[in-house]
Image: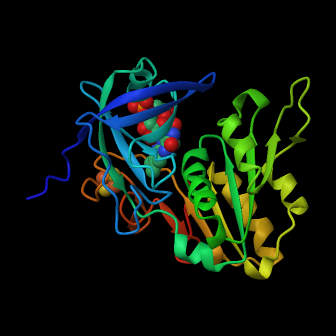
Amino acid sequence: MKNIYRPIPVELIKVEEHSHDTKLFRMKRSDGKPFSTNKDGLCFIPGQFVLAGLWGYGEAPFGAASEPSEDAYMDIIVRHTGGQVTTAMHRLKRGDHLTLRGPLGNGFPLKFFSTMGDLLLVTGGCGVPPIAALIEHIIRNRADFGRVHLVYGAKTPEDVLLKEDLKRWAKSIDVIIVVEKGSKGWKGERGLVTDCLASVRLDPSNTAVAMCGPGPMIDAIEHIVNPMGITDRRIFISVERRMQCGVGRCQHCVCGDRYACTDGPVFNLDEYDINWD
Ligand SMILES: Cc1cc2nc3c(=O)[nH]c(=O)nc-3n(C[C@H](O)[C@H](O)[C@H](O)COP(=O)(O)OP(=O)(O)OC[C@H]3O[C@@H](n4cnc5c(N)ncnc54)[C@H](O)[C@@H]3O)c2cc1C
Ligand code: FES
């Protein structure tokens, strides 16, 4: 019988600092095998998460952030919260080992997105990883998707993650980066992601939205895109809830009558009115 709690050992092949409190960890399986793929050739669906664990410290959920069909490695992006797991993870170096469970949860509806004309991706703070994986998937399968717009908000230019990837993505999709507080030399947008939505040229009658970020940001965007004609049925959000088991057993991640770990973490706003408290 398959043990759903049994992790696989993984080795860090890259640890990269992306901001004062955030690092990217690239992992390969310690047994040298590739990560398993699903029937579509994906190791995970963008929006799914993994539980990374360190013996003696515990496990924590992180969105898988790399290109989903890449089976040689998987990336996660970890913000140091000051808590036990992320503090221990931020001490790790290349060659160190951790454990991995997953991929878990549902992920974004890729087939639905490919039937839509436009796709608006909105992210902020540490919500970038699942959106990064979605963009990598779109770029690899570019002909399957229409126009794609990314609006990415950060507090300052120093907090913008994946800077090199953003330059690469901008060759294939429209990218707007907005910072709340621009430092000297910042030439991009200033303000909140909500301030930039009016400048995004999209066809609301044929647009889907994928979001991952702080709850208040998601609420504010819903109130902007709904009047444009983008209904909740076409808005998908990835939520963060405190989790333990990750597999629908412990009830730690309950949101209303659903579990974020098994029914989500991606929810359609039409099906479920998220309570952010
Ligand atoms: C589905 C999912 C995907 C996630 N993806 C990422 C990711 O890609 N990158 C990333 O850096 N983080 C992500 N998180 C959040 C991450 O799991 C937590 O930051 C981590 O569990 C903290 O562990 P810790 O032991 O260091 O801190 P803890 O001791 O558990 O907590 C430290 C502080 O962080 C807060 N915190 C912990 N978990 C959460 C949470 N889920 N939501 C809000 N606040 C929390 C606590 O309230 C506390 O203030 C994700 C969470 C979920 C549920
Ligand atoms: S984390 Fe245990 S039920 Fe969701």
Residue 148: x and y in percent read 73, 63
Q: Residue at x 39, y 49 (%)?
A: 71
- Badge count: 0
Vertical position of residue 58 compared to residue 240: above or below: above
Q: Nearer the viewer, residue 217 or 40?
A: 40
Residue 30: x and y in percent read 26, 33
Q: Residue at x 59, y 49 (%)?
A: 132
Tell me which corner region of the image, top left, top right, bottom left or bottom right, holds residue 60: top left
Q: Residue furthest left?
A: 1
Q: Is residue 251 visible?
A: no
Q: Seen in the image, is 211 located left or right of residue 83? A: right
Q: Residue at x 24, y 27 (%)?
A: 55
Q: Is residue 183 visible?
A: yes
Residue 243: x and y in percent read 37, 47
Q: How is the image coloured?
A: rainbow
Residue 58: x and y in percent read 29, 32
Q: Seen in the image, is 170 located left or right of residue 105? A: right
Q: Residue at x 83, y 75 (%)?
A: 228
Q: Nearer the viewer, residue 44 or 213?
A: 44
Q: Seen in the image, is 23 located left or right of residue 145? A: left
Vertical position of residue 143 compared to residue 217: above or below: below
Q: Nearer the viewer, residue 84 or 20?
A: 20
Which quadrant, please, contains the N terminus? Answer: bottom left
Q: Nearer the viewer, residue 157 or 181?
A: 157
